[in-house]
Amino acid sequence: MTDVQKQIATGFTFTTDTYDQLTQSEVYGKVIGEMAEANPDIVVLTSDLMRSNKTGDFRKVFPERFFNFGIAENNMVAAAAGMAVSGKIPFLSTMAVFASLRCAESIRTDLAYPNLKVRIIATHAGLSMGNGGTTHHATEDIAILRSMANMTVVVPADSIETGKVVRASKDLDGPLYVRIGRSLEPIAYEDDQYEFTIGKSIMMRDHGSDATVIACGVCVKEAMDAADELKDEGIKIKVVNMHTIKPLDKEAVISLAKTTGVIATVEEHSIIGGLGGAVAETLADAGIGIKFKRMGVPDVFSVIGYPEELYARYGIDKEGIKKGIKEVLHI
Amino acid sequence: MGIKEFTTKEELLDFLDDKAVELRKEIIHLSAIAGGGHLGGGLSMVDVIVALHYHVMNLKQGDPRWPKRDRFVLSKGHGSIAYCPVLADLGFFPKDWLETFNRLDSPFGMHPDMKKIPGVEMSTGSLGHGLSVAVGMALSARLDNEDWRVFVLLGDGETNEGMVWEAVQAASHYKLGNITAIIDRNSLSLDGPTEEIMSIEPISQRWEAFGWRVYDIDGHNMETIVDTFDSLPPADNETPNLVIARTVKGKGVKFMEDNPIWHYSGLDGEKSEEAFKSIEQCRPARRATK
C-alpha cells in the first residue's frame, strides 16, 4: 500500500496544521475513506470530477465502491437513488452549479421526494470558480435546495467543519446537500475540538450587542475578522456561523434579533432565497421588525475575476462586511 | 420462477392471458371510479407486466420486501393504473385500497409513490429517470454478489429524453447484463405518432450501437413474450437487454385502439360497459385441453 492508502485505511490523523493545507474537498475525500472503512454500504460517485472532488484516494482503496458516471450528472443522481433503495449510502459529488441547476429535478424527484439517504457533496460552490465565470458560479443553489421538502442543507465554514459535517451525516436520515468551495480557504476554527450539530448555529465572536452578523461558508471567517476590526473602532458585534441553512436554527435567529436589534446576513450566494432569505422569513414569521441587511451577490450574474476580487466586488469580504454593518447602523 | 407452478406451458399461457383480461377490466373499473386514467398506455403494457409479475420475475406472494426479489421500475410512471392492481393481486396490500384511486390523500394517483404503495420500488412519473435508477440498483446487486435482476419499463416516447441515453451508455459501460429494459412500443405519444413528433426508429440499431442486446417482439402475444423473457441470458452476463414490445395503444378495447385521444380519459357508465364487452371479445383462445 502507498502512504495515501495506508493513511485512509488506518484513518487520517488531522492536526490544525494539516487542515490549513487541505481544501474542503480534500478533507471530504479523506473523511469519506475513513467512514467507508467502517461502513461497507458507503459508495462514492462522481461525474468525471474525481480529481476536482478529491475522491481519487477513495478509489485507490475501495475501487469496487467507486463509480465514475462520466459527464452525465442526472444519471448519476438517479443511479444514486437506485443504490440507496438497494441498501447503499451514496456520496455523490459534482460542482454545485451542476448539482443544483442541471440536476435540480433529479435531486428533488429521485432523492428528496422518496427521502433517500444520499449525500450530495457540491463542490466549487459560490464564486469559488472565479474566472470560470457565471457558467461555473453557483449562486442560486441554497435557494433551490432549501425549497425541497426533506432536504437538509449545510454550508460548512472551512475544511475543519467540512470534516465535521461529513462525519455527522452518519446519523442523519434523508438527503443532505453539503456546499463546499474549491481552494484553500481561510480556516475559521482554531482546531476541531468543538461540538458540531447539524441545525445548531455556533457563536464565533461575541464582542457586544450592537449588531449580529449571521454568516455561512467562507463568509464566516471574513465576518469574524470584520468583527475584530470593528471592535477597535468601538462597534461591538456578534458573529454567528449558521452552517445549517435547513433546518434553520430559528431559535438562535429570534434570540439574536431580540438581543441585538440589528441583523446582517452574509453569504457567497444571491441575496435572494439563500441564508438571507431564510433569516428574513424567520424574522417576518415571528413578527419581529428590526434593522436588517442581506449581504451577498445582488440580483445580477457574477463577473469574471479571482474569488477574492469577486468577494470584494460584491461586498462579502472583511471590508465589505464592515461597510455593510456601518450602513445598517447608520454610522 | 413465477409465483405459481404449472404442469404444461399451455396452462401457464392460459393463466397469463386470463390475468391480462382481468387487468384490462380492472383498468377500466379504476378509471371509472378515479374519474379518469392513462388508458391508452395502461392497456398497451398489460401483457408485458402480467408476464413479468406472474411468471418471469422472481417474486414472493405477499412479501413486497423479500430481499431476493427481482426489481421492477415503472419508468413510464403514468402506467400506474395498470401497475398498482398487479401489486394488490400479488398480496402486497389489500385490493380495496385501490377504490380510493385519485381521491384526496390516496396512495394512488397518476404516478406511483414508493413511500405509500407497498411493492413500488421507486417513485416515478417524471419521464426519463427510471433507467438511471435501474442502473443504480443493478450496480448494487453486483456489489453484493446478488443475482436478482432489474426490469424497467419505458414508454416509447420517453426515450426522447436525453437522460435515458445517459443510462443506456452507463449500463453497457458497467456491463449490467442484470438489467432488462422494455420499451412499450405503442407508437403514440401524447401529441400523436412518435415518428411524427420526434422519431425514435431505428430503435434496435440505436440501442445495439450502445452495446445492448435487443429483442424485437409482438408485445401482445403471450407465448412470444414468455419465450423471450425465458431465453434471457443469466443475470451475471455482461450485456444489458432491451425488449422492444410492439404494442397497440388502448389494446383490448376496440374503440380506443391506436387513437391518441384515449391517452388520458374518463369513461361514463355506458362507455365502461362497451369497454368490458370489447375486452371479453378480445379474449385470446384457450390453449390447454381440459
Image (cartoon, rainbow, N blue to C red):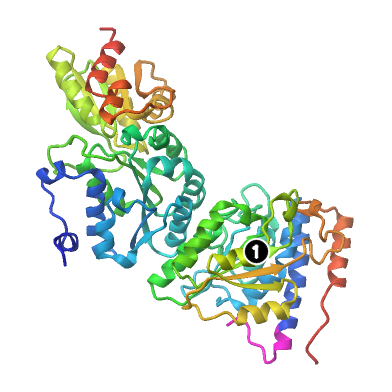
**Residue B9 forms part of the magenta stretch:** yes
Q: Nearer the viewer, residue B116 or A193?
A: A193
**Residue B108 location (% of width, % of height):** 64, 55
Q: In this image, A107 relative to A44: left or right?
A: right
Q: Is residue A176 left or right of residue B238?
A: left
- B209 w.r.t. A158: above or below: below
Q: Secondary structure at mark 1?
A: helix
Q: Please tell me how crowded label 1 is: few (under 14), some (14-19), or many (20+) other residues with Cα within 10 Å.
A: some
Q: Left of B161 or right of it: where is B287? A: right
> Which residue is at 15% across, 59% downward?
A7
Task: Specify whether residue A320 is painted magenta.
Answer: no
Name of the residue lying farthest toward the top = A331
Quarter of the picture holding the N terminus of chain B: bottom right
- Which image quadrant for residue A204? top left
x and y percentages locating residue A118 in the rendered image: 39, 53
Q: Is residue B156 left or right of residue A34?
A: right
x and y, in percent, of residue B61 in the image: 58, 76
Callout 1 amino acid: Ile
Q: Up-down: is A116 above or below B179?
A: above
When asked about the image quadrant of residue A191, the answer is: top left
